[in-house]
Amino acid sequence: MNIHAGADHMQPPLLDVHDLTVEFSTRRGMVRAVEKVNLTLAKGETLGIVGESGSGKSVTSYTVMRILDRAGRIAEGSITFGGVDVGNAPEAQVRTLRGREMSMIFQNPRAALNPIRKVGKQIEDVLIEHVQAQPSNAREKAIEVLQAVRIARPEERYHAYPFELSGGMCQRIVIALALACRPQLLIADEPTTGLDVTTQKAVMDLVVELARERNMATILITHDLGLAAAYCDRVMVMEKGRVVETATAEAIFRAPQHAYTRKLMRATPRGGITLRDLLPEEVAAEMAPLTTAKPLAGGPSLLVVENLIKEYPRPSTGSGLARLFGAKVAPPEPFRAVDGISFSLARGESLGLVGESGCGKSTTSMMLMRLLDPTSGRIIFNGEDLANISAKTFARSPWRSRIQMVFQDPTDSLNPRFTAARSIADPLMRLGEPMASAALRARVEELATLVGLPVSLLDRFPHQLSGGQKARVGIARAIALDPELVVLDEPTAALDVSVQAVVLNLLQDLKQRLGMSYIFVSHDLEVVRMLCDRVIVMRSGRIVEEGQTEAVMASPKADYTRELLSSIPHPPA
């Protein structure tokens, strides 16, 4: 879909990158991260740069902004922005351009903000630095900037710290910082990673609306092809530092020319296909077809959740003076993160738990894992009410080995001091039967083989593994004790689409082979559609809809479910 009106291509481009080559100095010599990249961008135009991790997308954008790591340098080529040779301009001149004429939205909004400075003051800093405001009127202008990015109650949010805001709100603050000086060029580096689909749509609609209002050129860097298709005029595909294809968004998605582009398109989850269809044809052909075995019916459920509630106390709003004089101040009503939900899970079943950020799905999964105590309710697993066992003592309970978890971030969930083998062995050493070192190593190698991790990588540390390899280590660790239930918390959110395709197929194969049940927590509805038998939709701590996945996706009954489904960006069919 073409969002922007066509720019006047008779005018010279706002940004012209010619034969750009970027090198980094490493211990093993020079590494060429970007090679012979060419791109042009006109005012009012949106260019999408897509590709997997390591393709050179971010390095290209950092070079345009002249914020490369100290070890990086422009080996060849030129960057011209508004008639200025950015590559050779003095640092003082480039510093003036950054923020005022070209700006950037970074991938992690919380990391981009100062955690100990109020967000309003951070916007003031930008305005004052680029002479867009004086100290006397900076607060007023900062509030106007917050209003421009549609932040509710901007006067209150001005005084907030980043940790007091949701992920979507932090992203709006970062957009406000980037647009405070009304730049001509905005570079958005994975601006919606980790956001739920409704927040993602709100953020991208906001960027597009502001770009249209200000005739601003935009570069959208993403590995989400649906997002690029929905919001970009042209798309540039990068692989291993080179541009392999450039065309209009409609042309590149309807008739991709390069094999790599076709591979990315094939790996993107969408309706009407199976998990095997995500894999490259030659890989899918070598794998056994997925069976359509149904969850075991007729017997008792593996898991039954009854009226589960989790409340958190709110800070007191009473007057400090009233408390000082002994006046009784009624405590505020607690915040109810999970509000009386009930559901069941059959043996061998996959259940999807979906909803926007803050809906209670992660809190629910933490209570099911017994990492968090519920306020009230029952968690009946194999006939035993696990809610009666406190979270502090559950780690030593014999039930611990039967419920395991795969965490969202494959990097942060691994101990950086442990090799892959030691990470996989950890639950065996802590919760399993004692075994000799040779038997332990043999079991670790068996698990590595089961998840498709080469045994030769077992003695590597996490920083020496790719994202997909680290995800496999996390999965091997979770299944080491042959659990009956595995809770998967956004296990593919940080992975490229091709790696995600492999991991999703691996999870489905393991479920069928080992007879496990899954609870799959996600905001990616297309992934849930392909992996889960049933789905539960949550909002504000409550279940608003549940049922067979295909039925809910095809004919949703709740307005909120329809809103979620309509927010999913789709590449052209």
Image: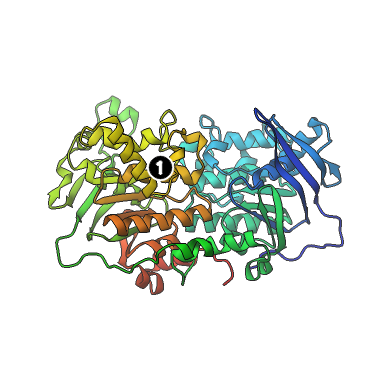
If the image is split into quadrants, where does the C terminus sit?
bottom right
Is residue 326 at least partly visible in the picture?
A: yes
If the image is split into quadrants, where does the N terminus sit?
bottom right
Name the residue located 65 percent from the left edge and 33 percent from the top edge. 125
> In front: 327, or 314?
314
Quadrant of the image occupied by residue 537? bottom left
Q: Is residue 362 left or right of residue 390?
A: right
Name the residue located 30 percent from the left edge and 33 percent from the top edge. 438
Residue farthest along the left direction in this orientation: 383
Residue 488, given in percent of the width and then of the height, sits at 35, 50
The amino acid at mark 1 is: Val
Is residue 542 at least partly visible in the picture?
A: no
> In front: 556, or 458?
458
> In front: 402, or 142?
402
User: What residue did someone put label 1 on?
Assistant: 473
Residue 274, given in percent of the width and then of the height, sits at 44, 67
Q: Is residue 400 left or right of residue 23?
A: left
Q: Is residue 338 left or right of residue 297?
A: right
Name the residue located 32 percent from the left edge and 44 percent from the top edge. 478
Residue 199, given in percent of the width and then of the height, sits at 49, 55
Residue 224, given in percent of the width and then of the height, sits at 56, 56
Quadrant of the image occupied by residue 512? bottom left
Q: Secondary structure at mark 1?
A: helix
